[in-house]
Image (cartoon, helix red, strand yellow):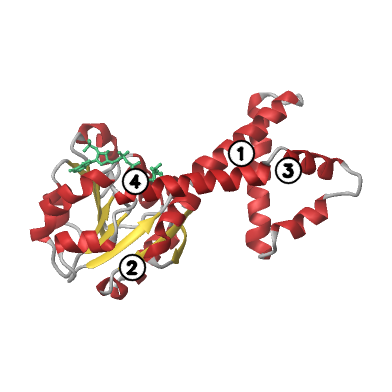
Amino acid sequence: MKIAILGTGNLGVSLAKGLIFSNAFTSLYLTKRNSDAIKDFEEYSKVKVTADNREAVQNSDILLLSVQPTQLERILEEIKDLLTDKHVIISTVTGFKIPRIEAIIGEDQFIIRAMPNTAIAVGKSMTCLCCNEKGKKRIAIAEAIFNRLGTSIIIPENKMQAATVICASGIAFWMRLIRATSQGAVQLGFDAKEAQQLAVHTCLGAASLLIESGKHPEEEIDRVTTPRGCTIEGLNEMEHNGLSSSLIKGLQASFKKINNISEK
Ligand SMILES: NC(=O)C1=CN([C@@H]2O[C@H](COP(=O)(O)OP(=O)(O)OC[C@H]3O[C@@H](n4cnc5c(N)ncnc54)[C@H](OP(=O)(O)O)[C@@H]3O)[C@@H](O)[C@H]2O)C=CC1
Ligand SMILES: O=C(O)[C@@H]1CCC=N1
């Protein structure tokens, strides 16, 4: 696959790392106006760094667009006359809906929206996908790419904002939960390094249990909570202080914000 990432910033760099470490391309163009900032990627074979989006488009088939929402229109205008039937356009841009993309480059393009997260750098992204009518013929390509770099599901476009909150912003939310666990572990006597190790591997264990078993979290919780034991004592104290409620409210606030941004 000849892939280009147009707009190699925070997410684009994560995408590039994931693609490089999974060796998932025959050539990879990375673009950025300040391309010097990502020059180091040229150390990898088959990777080309440039500020020239048009050169990248002409030499690639899969175009991953990963700029800020306010920057997407400009880049689409810049490349639209170069688009042919070989191109699959995959946008990770938040809130920039397919009809807006079609209004710039036309409906007769394979257009896919992807909402990955930065864990794509280590092949562990949860990525949600949707596409335009024509894109249905190429969605399997996007699935192949994102399944190699984690897990993907196809969803209707009207759920992409919610997916952004849960999966993309979700990385930040989980990081805070891990940090809080580490802080608690330090208070209980572990040094900072040990505390983080305990927190991340316990978090990984919890997620792995649910992935492998497909069970509801509460079923696994029941296995841990000894009657009158320390687990239920801790859980109830957390809930009295609003753990679940706080998380749900945070997700709702994030969702409200993303809808406001997208309307502008
Ligand atoms: N960060 C995340 O975890 C996630 C982000 N997203 C979405 O992905 C998109 C990218 O996010 P993020 O990586 O955080 O944003 P960044 O601002 O970090 O990256 C955008 C990059 O695009 C480059 N750029 C801007 N204009 C052009 C242009 N005309 N040609 C080439 N490159 C250009 C910028 O560099 P320069 O100015 O040098 O050109 C910058 O490095 C956003 O729409 C975001 O909402 C989605 C999921 C997760
Ligand atoms: O914080 C943001 O708005 C973007 C979208 C998801 C991740 N970063």
Tag nearer the camera, 3 or 2:
3
**Residue at 17% across / 42% down in the picture?**
50
- Disc 2 residue: CB within 8 Å of ligand 1: no
Residue type, numbered disc 2? Ile
Distance (Cα) linking label 1 and label 3: 14 Å
Where disc 4 sits, the SS reads helix
User: Is 243 positioned to the left or the right of 125 in the image?
Assistant: right
Labelled disc at residue 239: 3
Q: Amino acid at mark 4?
A: Ile
> Rounded to the nearest whole Å, what is the CA distance between mark 3 and mark 2?
43 Å
Q: How many labels were placed on the picture? A: 4
| Sequence-first disc among 1 and 2 | 2
Instruction: Characterize the local packing of mark 4: few (<14), some (14-19) or many (20 or more) Cα atoms within 10 angstroms.
Output: few
CA separation in Å, label 1 and label 2: 34 Å
Q: CA distance from mark 4 to mark 1?
A: 26 Å
Residue picked out by circle 2: 141
Q: Marks 1 and 3: which is nearer the front?
A: 3
Q: Which residue is mark 4?
A: 261
Q: Position of residue 26 (x, y in %)?
A: 27, 58
Q: Residues within 10 Å of mark 2 (few under 14, many from 20)?
A: some
Residue 75 numbered tag? none
Ligand 1 is found in the corner quadrant, namely: top left
Is disc 3 in contact with disc 4, using a CB cutoff of under 8 Å? Answer: no
Q: Secondary structure at mark 1?
A: helix
